[in-house]
Image (cartoon, rainbow, N blue to C red):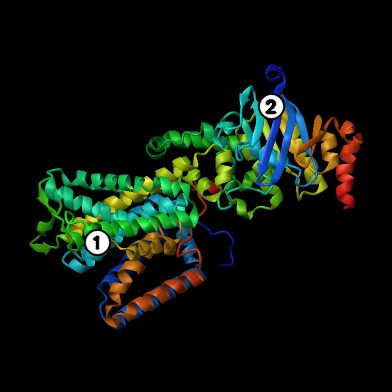
Amino acid sequence: MNQPSIPMRAPAAVLAAAGIAITLYLWLFLHAESQLSVAILLAVALAAVVAGRRLGATRRLEAAGMSRPGLARLWAAAGTLALIAAFYDTHFALLMICTVLLYTTACLGLTLQFGFSGVANFAGAAFFGIGSYATAVLAAHSGLPHLLIIVIAGVISALVGSLLIAPVLRTRGHYAALVTIAFGILFKTFIEVNDVLGGPQGLQVPGMRLFGYALNDGFTVFGADVSFYVSYALLSLGICGGVFAVVKALERSWVGLAMDVVRTDETAAATFGLHIARWKVVAFMLGNFFAGIAGSVYGMVTGFVAPNNFTFSDSLLMLSIVILGGLGNAVGLVPAAIIVLVLPEKLQFIQEYRFLFYAALVIAILLFRPAGLMPRKTRLFFAGEASR
Amino acid sequence: MSSVNDTGVMVEVRGLTMRFGGLTALDSLDMRIREGEILGLLGPNGSGKTTFFNVLTGLYKASGGSIRYRGEEVIGKSPQEIYRGGVARTFQRSRLSLPLTVFDNIVIGDYQHMRHGLGFNLFRRKAFRAEYDAYVDKVKGLLEIFSPPLVARLFEPVETFTMIDRRRIEVCRALMSQPRLLLLDEPSAGMTHDETHELMNDILDVRGKLKSLSVVLIEHEMNVIERITDRCVVLNYGKKIAEGTYAQITADPDVQTAYLGEEAA
């Protein structure tokens, strides 16, 4: 705290310690079922956050992450793999991991739209849903390889979203947001009244097949039965990691710069030759593509899609993850998604009060951290540039 | 129009009119901007100076008249096309992207030459790095001229800088595009006398290096106008009331009325 500049000691060791500690904590958290253990874990998290800030550990971790981004990603991936391995036979924990990874993927898309280009999309769940429905239909009625279906589902989501481009570009701020809200409601209603797509009852989604192997079959390793969710969790991790890498690469490129300038000052952007519409369209299409592929895999994970999974409140949930994590910060999405998606499940024992508790927690977080859990950092195109 | 092709005329403005509802901000304005000159644009507040910049850069569409820039009609073109034609500007109220770094804000001035395709930016990181490194050197080079202390703070967000530094950054952003025509909207507002002096010296320096660069300067400080402009145009209520060298316009009775009248009021 007293030192203005952080002495950069052994970033690798800092990252290793943080990686192991966070993985262990999440392992305990996903295990916790009793009121007491959940309460203790929440208290530990609060104490760790406060102590981390007091002792400068948080800043040291941030600095370590900035100086060795590749290593930080490796630890994140390794930690997630360790969790998947630890819960190899626990369906529910694996489903939670899949959900967090896939929602994070969709929210990466929303970050590109809202955080980078300033286009608030209040229909995230609709584009997620378009991916799920496209997968349900394509997997049931075509012989296309399932990996290709995931990509096609994303493309369909982006193409359906392109219907909104004209009204979104013609309006700004709140008005553009209203256009997306209307679309989200339109999507849900359309699905509900459409008998071909199953109406309110929804559709079955066939399980995924990869190179002749059916993911839903599950498998055994050294004689132990492994949950079929393990395969889906690995797939979700791969997709989430890939989308994360793309979004980060875009942020640290002229594309990210152009989007930031368009968001912060359209007049200045136009004066220096930036095509406002082009960048908003790129962000909007790409973001919906990511939401679509996340929805595609999510549909296969749950095996079932219905209109009620893709309501306006689900869109709000996604947007709240984006804002809670720190608008524009891809890394912040992960803790935010865990708080928004896993915490209510862990609070089952207080029944409906869990939503009250969870809502109060979100308000408390934003009260103490108005820019989100991890506010977006100033862009550096390459690690270590500031010290050059 | 034969006059358009006159050597030495960069911008030819004829009968330019800009109305906002009942208000006429520019009223059949005729003027010229010559190659390589520094033209002072003067006038009391609300006389249409900034409106002229906004029309010339394509932000407003004129209600009537024409602006020919290097022989081509400007009215009807988008701000992006006009920028690519070599016109760059600063804004009266600073328009920088505050959360972005000094580097980000300046480098965007050269957007037209950046390779901003998705494929290049995503998949050719090595080539991107090379282009990026070249830009870092170029931005540093510009800052060395305008504000050497800013070089050390190249990667700090603009919101941490004073207004004066922000204006310098805006001038650098405009120059980054290597414009033919540079429009400066009150660059010295809020600066002390010495700071203004320094900034104007830097602008003269840059003009000395780029012989064909024309500069239009909106400015209120008369000693600045006297020192650096080759010629002046004075506006009042959207009309040109005088044109000539500093000595000529200050001797003009209409100009004296416009200014003294305002001060007396």
**Element assignment for label 2:** strand
What residue appears at the point 45 percent right and 52 percent down from the top-left corner? A119
On the image, which quarter does residue B43 sit in? top right
Tell me if residue B95 comes above or below residue A46 in the rendering. above
**Element assignment for label 1:** helix
Q: Which mark is residue A255?
A: none
Asked whether, in this view, residue A89 is left or right of residue A185, the answer is left
Q: Amino acid at mark 2?
A: Val
Image quadrant in which the N terminus of chain B is located:
top right
Tell me if residue A339 comes above or below residue B88 in the rendering. below
Instruction: Residue A265: give x, y in percent of width and height.
Output: 56, 48
Q: Nearer the viewer, residue B107 or A29?
A: B107
What residue appears at the point 13 percent right and 45 percent down from the top-left corner? A142
Chain for mark 2?
Answer: B
CA separation in Å, label 1 and label 2? 60 Å
Instruction: Residue A370: give x, y in percent of width and height.
Output: 51, 67
* Local crowd size for mark 2, using a 10 Å CA cut-off: few (<14), some (14–19), many (≥20): many
Q: Which residue is mark 1?
A: A307
Instruction: Residue B127: give x, y in percent of width and height.
Output: 43, 33
Instruction: Residue A105: give x, y in percent of width and height.
Output: 32, 54
Q: Which residue is mark 2?
A: B11
Residue A25 appears in the picture as rendered: yes
On the image, which quarter does residue A80 sit in? bottom left
Asked whether, in this view, residue A289 is left or right of residue A322, the answer is left
Tell me if residue A145 comes above or below residue B117 in the rendering. below
